[in-house]
Amino acid sequence: NAGVTQTPKFRVLKTGQSMTLLCAQDMNHEYMYWYRQDPGMGLRLIHYSVGEGTTAKGEVPDGYNVSRLKKQNFLLGLESAAPSQTSVYFCASRNRDRNQPQHFGDGTRLSIL
Amino acid sequence: GQNIDQPTEMTATEGAIVQINCTYQTSGFNGLFWYQQHAGEAPTFLSYNVLDGLEEKGRFSSFLSRSKGYSYLLLKELQMKDSASYLCAVLRNTNAGKSTFGDGTTLTVKP
């Protein structure tokens, strides 16, 4: 039972570099989300998707892009990394039924130098 | 808009009972979740309330009052492994199942 898998688990980037974080879920969930979590600030929604081929902005979308070409995958891209993007990134998915919780991946710890 | 308040930190003794409060002000309320997050790990689901009242699940119970914008998580017979952060999340009435998360309450259980 893999659930939600995030790769990579850790990464160090230099300012200005680009990278893509991959999220894969095997539960056939319609909804997927990308969050960032900073110390003392809880989870903040970056982007989300309600289905294959659709994405939308969350609370803190600037500096990030996403794509959902396949239902099971949700990619988060940083085009030009900045130190302010140093954070722990969590991907989550859920079924569309109202009372269903989100299932989270183990997170990606990203440091921008 | 959405505003969710939880205490930042709490400390309790092993074997005791602790209550973690969450107050919220939000448009389009569609239920409230509690998640547990151990340090360095992913959040995991604990409970869901959509109607007023108490939901009991083993050592953990969660209460909701929609009229007061208030919920609490009650942990009984505390164990050392209950040391974690507890996140209150309001499910919003949107077509995307989005939740707004509080900043979390870090609970430390001492012997």
Image: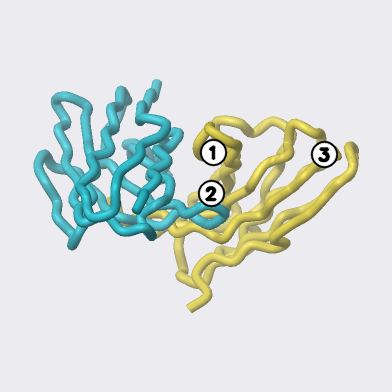
Q: Earlier in the sequence, mark 3 or mark 2?
A: 2
Q: Secondary structure at mark 2?
A: strand
Q: Earlier in the sequence, mark 1 or mark 2?
A: 2
Question: Can you see residue A32?
Answer: no
For the residues bearing labels 3 and 1, Cβ distance under 8 angstroms: no
Label 1 – label 2 distance at C-alpha: 7 Å
Label 3 – label 1 distance at C-alpha: 18 Å
Q: Amino acid at mark 3?
A: Ala
Letter of the chain in yellow: A
Name the subunit of mark 1: A
User: x and y percent of residue B89 in the render?
Assistant: 36, 40
Tag on residue B35?
none
User: x and y percent of residue A51 in the render?
Assistant: 51, 55
Tag on residue A45?
1
Letter of the chain in cyan: B
Q: Between residues A110 and B94, which one lies in front from this camera angle?
A: A110
- Is the C terminus of chain A in the top left, top right, bottom left or bottom right quadrant? top right
Q: Amino acid at mark 2?
A: Tyr
